[in-house]
């Protein structure tokens, strides 16, 4: 991430907080993953696995007491900026607990949840905002694409990864490569149907994908996976369907429908190993039917996005020796 | 000599009548601008309630469809939104007070209704926004009725006063 991306993100933050953040050193700006604003708590940024408190002069300080304390007014102003002064236009997003801004960055919202007849109706008394700066690393999947084919046919692939180990970033780049096609190794361009339930993969803002997801990719944004998969099968005739973080019973049912329609699949799931997820009630059926032909297992043993293994489901052989790709 | 005096009397009569007309036209201008402002709020309402467009886009859209003076009001707000990035829409509405007062010739209570809308605009869901718009439009309706009454009463009075003052001065001079 470059400092320009960071600077564009802080444009959505109230002036009193934006100024110190804009004075942070460039090397830190380039590596910041999260900016956390919590009411009556220090201004905090998260980079390279560490928290940094920021003071009013834009210096990082060790003691939280020396940091700039975020107040309710600053938080409310920031919320208005994120919403473009239009809370009514983002009701659905707010109900889901996050808003996607220009650039595909996601802002998580914390506060008091209001329940109504149809479940969550909104959030009031906003008490915390988490700016999650989206990272795009084009090319990170180039080296592993060759492992995802057998007899020139794409294999159903499941990316298994603990949180914040780069599974969405890797999935996005795989989608881009499959959609655009590649010369080395030769891969023809596939029609990809992407169900981006949390607007994280394509980072759609005002209908335009903010991330590179390839020229043959159709996106259903903010759509439940279970609904989106069925809609794509019916309307877009994709060769491959891509989804993030599968797990619900409805998701699995929709995936089975897609497989019956002869569509290939790339998905991600939270987990640490095949054994860890194999026993999950909802995923059991997919394993017993040997749906997935490749498992990519990520961890952060050698930095975020380390590909620990690529397993061939037929013989459980690791196709890859440890390789750092991010 | 008589011709010059006659010419002077005409100038006095014309000047005083013009002053009377110009003082009277303030009341017409207020009515026209109130009606235009009310119409712009209706447009803003449909941008928000029907199209769910964000406020900066809604302001841009409506400023193309309103009278030049009201367009200027929204331009002031829009510019303030973009330049200041305050996170406070009300403070951007406050920037338009001078223009509303001096150019649109609105009264303080007219401006208060407009500012009250600025205080709540965009801050709640569509159902509540609709109520706020309804309230503002009703208030404007009342203000327009009141402004029209004032116009009928005062516009005629100032015009007549202007002419009568001119004639009075001429009589004194004769």
Image (spheres, coloured by chain):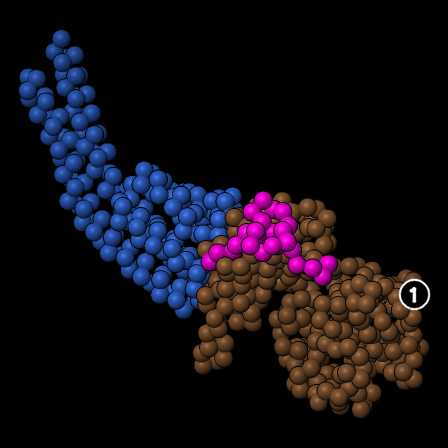
Q: Is residue B164 left or right of residue A203?
A: left
Q: Which image quadrant is residue A221 in?
A: bottom right
Residue A56, how many percent across, how many down?
56, 47
Vertical comparison of A266 with A286: above or below:
above
The C terminus of chain A is located in which quarter?
Answer: bottom right
**Residue drawn where x is 65% and y is 81% of the image:** A226
**Residue drawn where x is 59% and y is 60% of the image:** A36
Q: Chain of mark 1?
A: A
Q: Nearer the viewer, residue A74 or B143?
A: A74
The answer to if A64 sits in the magenta stretch is: yes
Query: Which residue is farthest top?
Result: B1
Q: In blue, which chain?
A: B
**Residue drawn where x is 70% and y is 46% of the image:** A26
Residue B41, how many percent across, how many down?
38, 55
The answer to if B149 sits in the magenta stretch is: no
Chain A is which colour? brown
The N terminus of chain A is located in which quarter?
Answer: bottom right
Badge 1 local density, few (<14 within 10 Å), some, or many (20+)? few
For the record, the magenta segment spans: A48-72
Total numbered circles: 1
Camera sees residue B58 = no
Name the residue beneath numbered marker 1: A185
Residue A253, how many percent across, how many down?
69, 87
Helix, strand or loop at mark 1: loop
Vertical comparison of A318 with B168: above or below:
below
**Residue drawn where x is 85% and y is 81% of the image:** A293
Q: Is residue A260 left or right of residue A101?
A: right
């Amino acid at each position: 991430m470059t400092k320009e991306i960071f600077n564009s993100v802080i444009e959505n933050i109230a002036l009193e907080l934006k100024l110190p953040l804009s004075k942070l050193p460039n090397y830190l700006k380039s590596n910041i993953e999260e900016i956390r604003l919590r009411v009556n708590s220090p201004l905090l940024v998260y980079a390279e696995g560490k928290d940094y408190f920021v003071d009013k002069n834009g210096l990082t300080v060790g003691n939280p007491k020396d940091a700039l304390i975020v107040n309710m007014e600053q938080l409310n102003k920031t919320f208005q900026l994120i919403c473009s002064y239009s809370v009514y236009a983002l009701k659905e997003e707010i109900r889901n607990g996050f808003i996607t801004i220009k650039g595909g960055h996601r802002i998580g919202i914390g506060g008091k949840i209001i329940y109504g007849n149809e479940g969550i109706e909104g959030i009031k008394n906003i008490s915390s905002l988490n700016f999650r700066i989206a990272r795009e690393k084009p090319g990170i999947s180039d080296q592993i694409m060759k492992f995802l084919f057998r007899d020139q046919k794409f294999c159903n692939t499941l990316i298994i990864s603990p949180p914040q180990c780069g599974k969405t970033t890797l999935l996005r780049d795989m989608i881009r490569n499959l959609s655009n096609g590649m010369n080395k190794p030769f891969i023809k361009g596939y029609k990809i149907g992407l169900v981006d339930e949390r607007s994280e993969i394509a980072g759609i803002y005002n209908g335009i994908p903010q991330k590179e997801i390839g020229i043959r990719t159709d996106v259903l944004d903010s759509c439940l996976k279970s609904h989106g998969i069925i809609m794509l099968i019916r309307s877009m005739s994709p060769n491959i369907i891509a989804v993030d973080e599968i797990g619900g019973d409805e998701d699995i049912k929709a995936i089975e429908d897609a497989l019956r329609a002869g569509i290939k699949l790339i998905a991600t799931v939270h987990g640490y190993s095949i054994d860890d997820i194999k026993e999950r009630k909802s995923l059991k059926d997919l394993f017993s039917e040997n749906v997935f032909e490749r498992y990519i297992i990520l961890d952060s043993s050698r930095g975020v996005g380390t590909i620990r293994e690529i397993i061939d489901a037929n013989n459980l052989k690791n196709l890859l020796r440890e390789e750092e790709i991010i | 000599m008589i011709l010059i005096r006659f010419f002077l009397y005409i100038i006095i009569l014309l000047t005083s009548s013009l002053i009377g007309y110009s003082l009277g036209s303030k009341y017409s201008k207020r009515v026209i601008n109130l009606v235009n402002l009310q119409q712009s709020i209706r447009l803003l309402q449909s941008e928000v309630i029907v199209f769910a467009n964000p406020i900066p886009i809604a302001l841009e859209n409506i400023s193309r469809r309103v009278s030049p003076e009201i367009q200027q009001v929204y331009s002031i707000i829009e510019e303030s939104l973009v330049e200041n990035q305050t996170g406070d829409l009300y403070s951007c509405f406050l920037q338009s007070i001078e223009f509303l007062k001096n150019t649109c010739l609105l009264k303080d209570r007219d401006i208060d209704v407009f500012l009250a809308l600025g205080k709540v605009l965009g801050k709640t869901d569509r159902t509540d926004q609709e109520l706020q718009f309804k309230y503002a439009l009703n208030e404007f309706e009342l203000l327009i009725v009141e402004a029209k009454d004032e116009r009928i009463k005062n516009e005629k009075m100032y015009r007549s006063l202007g002419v009568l003052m001119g004639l009075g001065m001429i009589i004194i001079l004769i």
